[in-house]
Image (cartoon, helix red, strand yellow):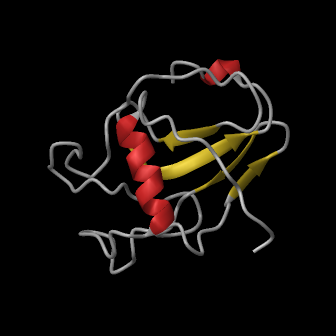
Amino acid sequence: PVGTIETKLYADKVPLAAENFRALCTGELGIGPGSAGKPLCYRGCLMHRIVPDFCVQGGDFTKNDGTGGMSIYPANSENGDMWGKFKDEQFMSHNRKGLLSMANNGKNRNGSQFFFTLRPVKHLDGK
C-alpha cells in the first residue's frame, strides 16, 4: 500500500450507497451470500481502471478486473434486486476532482464498483 485515502460519505443524501461503501471498507459483514466464498470487503482490491484526466476506478473485489463485484444487499431483499444490486438514489453533481461516485452497469444496477474523479465530469450528472 502506498497510502491512505480519506473521503466523505453523504449518508444523508445517498444512504444505500454510503452504507454499502462504508461496510465494504470495514469488511465487517464477512462472507456474503453469492460472493463465491469471498469476504464482502475492499481489502486487497485493485484499482483496475485508470483513465487519465477522468477517473480512477476500483471496487471489483470478486474478480479484480472490472467485471465483478457485488453490494452488501442480499438478492431479493428490501434493498437488493434479484442480483443483489441496489437502486439509484439522488444523483449528485460531479463538479470537482476527488469526488467518490458509484460506478454502475445501468439504471438501478449499483454493486461495489466506484470511482474517484480526476476533474469535474459534469456529463455524468444524472447518470
Horizontal side, residue 33 vs residue 19: left or right: left
Q: Position of residue 23 (x, y in %)?
A: 41, 59
User: Would residue 75 be visible to someone looking at this image?
Assistant: yes
- What residue is shown at x 51% (from left), y 69% (from top)? 63
Which residue is the extreme one toward the bottom? 37
Depicted 115 relative to depicted 48: above or below: above
Between 95 and 113, the one nearer to me in the picture: 95
How many numbered badges does the structure rendering display?
A: 0
Q: In the rendered view of the protein, which quadrant contains the N terminus? A: bottom right
Horizontal side, residue 39 vs residue 48: left or right: left
Residue 48: image quadrant is bottom right
Horizontal side, residue 60 vs residue 18: left or right: right
Residue 75: image quadrant is bottom left
Between 30 and 126, the one nearer to me in the picture: 30
- What residue is shown at x 51% (from left), y 24% (from top)? 127
Between 88 and 23, the one nearer to me in the picture: 23
Q: Position of residue 84 (x, y in %)?
A: 27, 52
- What residue is shown at x 79% (from left), y 38% (from top)? 118
Depicted 104 relative to depicted 34: above or below: above
Which residue is the extreme one toward the right? 53
Depicted 6 relative to depicted 109: above or below: below
User: Would residue 68 be visible to someone looking at this image?
Assistant: no
Q: Position of residue 29 (x, y in %)?
A: 32, 69
Q: Position of residue 31 (x, y in %)?
A: 32, 76
- What residue is shown at x 53% (from left), y 42% (from top)? 103
